[in-house]
Image: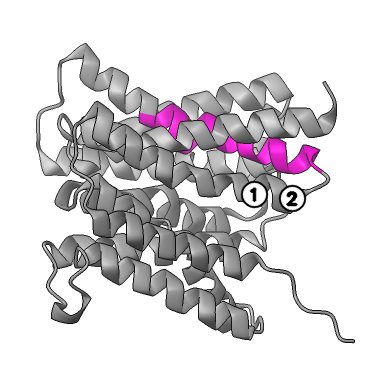
Amino acid sequence: MKNEQRAFVYAIAAVLLWSTVATAFKITLSHFSPTQMVAAASFVSAVSLLGVCAWQGKLSLIGKTFVANPLYFLLLGLINPLCYYLILFKAYELLPASQAQPINYSWAITLTLMAAVFLKQKIRAQDWVACAFGYLGVLVIATQGDVLSLQFDSPTGVGLALLSTLLWAGYWILNTKNKSDPVVGVLLGFLVALPIAFALAWIEGLGWPSLPSAWLAVSYVGLFEMGITFVLWVSAMKLTNNTARISNLIFISPFISLMLLATIIGEAIHPATVVGLALIIAGLVIQQLPKKRAA
């Protein structure tokens, strides 16, 4: 199989797996608290990424990479997975997944604004247009189409979903300074977060689920939201000679996700959610338009 074909297969696999996670989040949250979910899913992710590192012959890099810059990887781990997923899972607990997922999907637009502040990158006119489309879409989803009333079913849930976009964008901005192997870097984040996550779950004092289906659900989240899917996506990006074509496949994910939410857990999809998601996607597409060349 040629590299471009392999890149496409890896990317499609990642997109399809990411399309299932909103449904998996809601199913898992019916058994675990957000804190327990972060702890258990992070453990599964760490084990899976250790397996990938072993298979790729990178185990020796783990200690060396961390020792080279321990405070940096400590900060990354505190942001992602610890704080990011604690906040994201709480947003999913408070909101319908069909609202939380599209709002969280606007993180790429948030990244543009944060990059201008922290990396001194210039914001183009089309980036401002993209932001307008994206955040109008968020507002349409959050108010279920009644934009002028500014009434939210769960202001806290909407706020947490938006906060998750800041954390995720901030994580990738910090990653611009990360010269380590990407899989090793992500693994170190989970290893840093694990003891803190389990300590928080212990302080919370809730009993752990006993049903095998609950542990199957949280293992699925750990593997296919936090772990293996990241490796598939990074592999696709490394193999392709057309990054834009591969990265645009991610636009399929939220629409598949809405269909799965409706069919698997029977969540009602408000028409405003589809309209708002379309606005967010339009903003992301505008954002990716190439810069006009001077005549």
Quadrant occupied by the C terminus: bottom right
Indicate the secondary structure of the residue bearing disc 2: helix
Q: In the depicted view, which residue is nearer to us: 96 or 279?
A: 279
Mark 1 residue crowding within 10 angstroms, few (<14) / some (14–19) / many (20+): some
In the rendered view, does 64 fall on the left or right side of 95? Answer: right
Question: CA gap, disc 2 to disc 1?
Answer: 6 Å
At label 2, counting other C-alpha atoms closer than 10 Å, the crowd grade (few under 14, some 14-19, many 20 or more) is few
Residue 121 among those drawn in magenta: no
Q: Tell me the residue at 23%/65% (across/down).
A: 142
Q: Residue at x 58, y 78 (%)?
A: 127
Q: Position of residue 283 (x, y in %)?
A: 51, 68
Amino acid bearing label 2: Thr
Q: Amino acid at mark 1?
A: Ser
Residue wearing tag 2: 243
How many numbered circles are shown? 2
Q: Which residues are magenta?
A: 221-240
- Quarter of the picture containing the N terminus is top right
- Camera-side residue of 53 and 295: 295
In the depicted structure, whether residue 211 falls above or below residue 246: above
Q: Quadrant of residue 206?
A: top left
Position of 177 with respect to 286 (left or right) is right
Q: Can see residue 167?
A: no
Q: Position of residue 74 (x, y in %)?
A: 49, 54
Q: Residue beneath label 1, please?
A: 247
Up-down: is 210 above or below 63? above
Whether the magenta-drawn stretch holds residue 236 is answered as: yes
Q: Determine the residue positioned at 22% across, 75% down.
A: 147
Going by the image, does 129 lie left or right of 199? right
Q: Is residue 242 visible?
A: yes
Q: Which mark is residue 15?
A: none
**Numbered disc 1: secondary structure:** helix
